[in-house]
Image: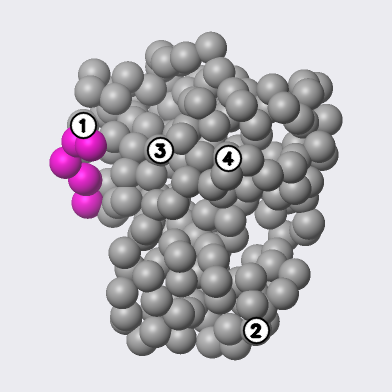
């Protein structure tokens, strides 16, 4: 789902939205962490990524959990829901998604999914979807020569106007400015409740 580079970007940003989607293992210390861990960042060449805690802790890998971010601990009853919703969005972000479809995937009501996810993360599933799409767009802007319009459709936006609006809200500049090294304010704006994501 995520490339090594994309995972590394999330680690540098201490991005809690990706907690539970992968784990960062540091070869020089023998520990593994959540992406959101606030400990001092290791050198890139000393990092491996694992999809599950079990893989990181396996006999062949041999990593132990970080005492600071405690990746082995589920911190709330909603953590499984957050993990499943986030995994579904990361897998299907390229196509139109509705809250009802996400709720059906996790076998819960749309109202419960939105309320529980928002309480646990501070953002709606719709905002998560927008964030994932913009994260993918910024990666493509930095690493490819694709046009802004091609990137817009590649990451799942249906209209360029929505792509530009959401990009500016989350990054504080246009895609073209971002590609040239412009602002990246990562503005956080909470969403009102939406049924369609």
As displayed, is residue 180 above or below residue 120?
below
Viewer-side label of 4, 2: 4
Pointers 3 and 2 in contact (C-beta within 8 Å): no
Q: Is residue 164 left or right of residue 95?
A: left
N-term-proximal mark, 3 vs 2: 3
Q: Residue at x 51, y 40 (%)?
A: 123
N-term-proximal mark, 4 vs 1: 1
Which residue, given by chain and number where applicable, does mark 1 sit on? 29
Q: Secondary structure at mark 2?
A: helix
Task: Work out how far the residue at label 4 is from the one at label 2, CA to CA, in angstroms.
Answer: 26 Å
Which residue is nearer to you in this view: 92 or 120? 120
N-term-proximal mark, 1 vs 2: 1
Pointers 1 and 2 in contact (C-beta within 8 Å): no
Viewer-side label of 1, 2: 2
N-term-proximal mark, 4 vs 2: 4
Q: Position of residue 139 (x, y in %)?
A: 48, 68
Residue density around tag 4, few if under 14, some if 14–19, many if 20 or more, within 10 Å: many
Does the magenta-highlighted stretch encompass residue 193?
Answer: no
The boundaries of the magenta stretch are 38-43
Viewer-side label of 1, 3: 3
Which residue, given by chain and number where applicable, does mark 4 sit on? 124
Which residue, given by chain and number where applicable, does mark 2 sit on? 149
Q: Is residue 17 left or right of residue 183?
A: right
Magenta stretch prevailing secondary structure: loop
N-term-proximal mark, 1 vs 3: 3
Residue 108 appears anywhere in the view: yes
Which residue, given by chain and number where applicable, does mark 3 sit on? 16
Which residue is nearer to you in this view: 136 or 54? 136
N-term-proximal mark, 4 vs 3: 3
Q: Secondary structure at mark 4?
A: loop
User: Which residue ends up furthest to the left in the rendered image?
Assistant: 40
């Amino acid at each position: 789902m995520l490339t090594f580079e994309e995972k590394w970007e999330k680690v540098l940003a201490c991005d809690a939205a990706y907690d539970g989607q992968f784990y960062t293992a540091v070869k020089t210390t023998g520990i593994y962490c959540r992406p959101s861990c606030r400990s001092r960042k290791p050198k890139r060449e000393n990092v491996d990524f694992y999809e599950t805690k079990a893989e990181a802790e396996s006999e062949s890998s041999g990593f132990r959990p970080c005492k600071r971010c405690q990746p082995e601990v589920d911190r709330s009853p909603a953590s499984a829901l957050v993990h499943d919703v986030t995994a579904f969005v990361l897998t299907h972000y390229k196509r139109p998604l509705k809250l009802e479809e996400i709720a059906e995937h996790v076998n819960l009501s749309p109202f419960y999914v939105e309320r529980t996810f928002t309480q646990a993360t501070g953002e709606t599933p719709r905002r998560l979807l927008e964030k994932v799409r913009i994260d993918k767009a910024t990666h493509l802007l930095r690493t490819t020569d694709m046009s802004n319009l091609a990137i817009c459709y590649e990451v799942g936006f249906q209209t360029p106007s929505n792509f530009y609006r959401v990009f500016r809200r989350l990054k504080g500049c246009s895609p073209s400015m971002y590609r040239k090294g412009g602002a990246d304010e990562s503005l956080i704006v909470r969403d009102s409740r939406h049924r369609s994501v």
